[in-house]
Image: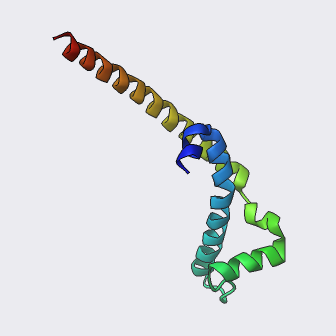
Amino acid sequence: MGFILQHCHPVVLLLSGSPFAHILQVVRARLQQRQAHNRAVQYRDGLATLKLIIQREGTGGLYKGLVPNVLRVMPQSAITFLVYEKVMQLLEAEVFRNLEKSWAH
């Protein structure tokens, strides 16, 4: 896993993980809707909810709202990534400066 994280672009990782995580968000949302509307128990648990969504709506039902979710997450992730990279560059430069000073003495 470390190799993948070191050699893949963060956008690729975001897009590959997001659809799978989104399925869990859809299931969680359906379970929460059940509680919010005090309806008859349509969704008993996560697995039953997953099966019911696929049965009624097909696999496309698992990805409802994926595009808005990715559009919301991508700018946030890009900013986090850019800030992280810049901070790492600054820290590395400071560490090398300190090493050079210590070697000069």
The residue at 62%/37% (across/down) is 9
In this rendering, the answer to whether 45 lies above or below 84 is below
In this image, 104 relative to 92: left or right? left
In this image, 76 relative to 103: left or right? right
In this rendering, the answer to whether 69 lies above or below 12 is below
In this rendering, the answer to whether 38 lies above or below 58 is below
Residue 91: x %, y % from top left: 34, 26
In this rendering, the answer to whether 51 lies above or below 72 is below
Could you say which is closer to the camera, residue 82 or residue 8? 8
| Among the 4 quarters of the image, the one containing residue 54 | bottom right
Q: Report the residue that reaches farthest toward the top.
A: 104
Residue 103: x %, y % from top left: 22, 14
**Numbered label tally:** 0
The residue at 68%/64% (across/down) is 23
Quadrant showing the C terminus? top left
In this image, 91 relative to 26: left or right? left
The residue at 83%/71% (across/down) is 57
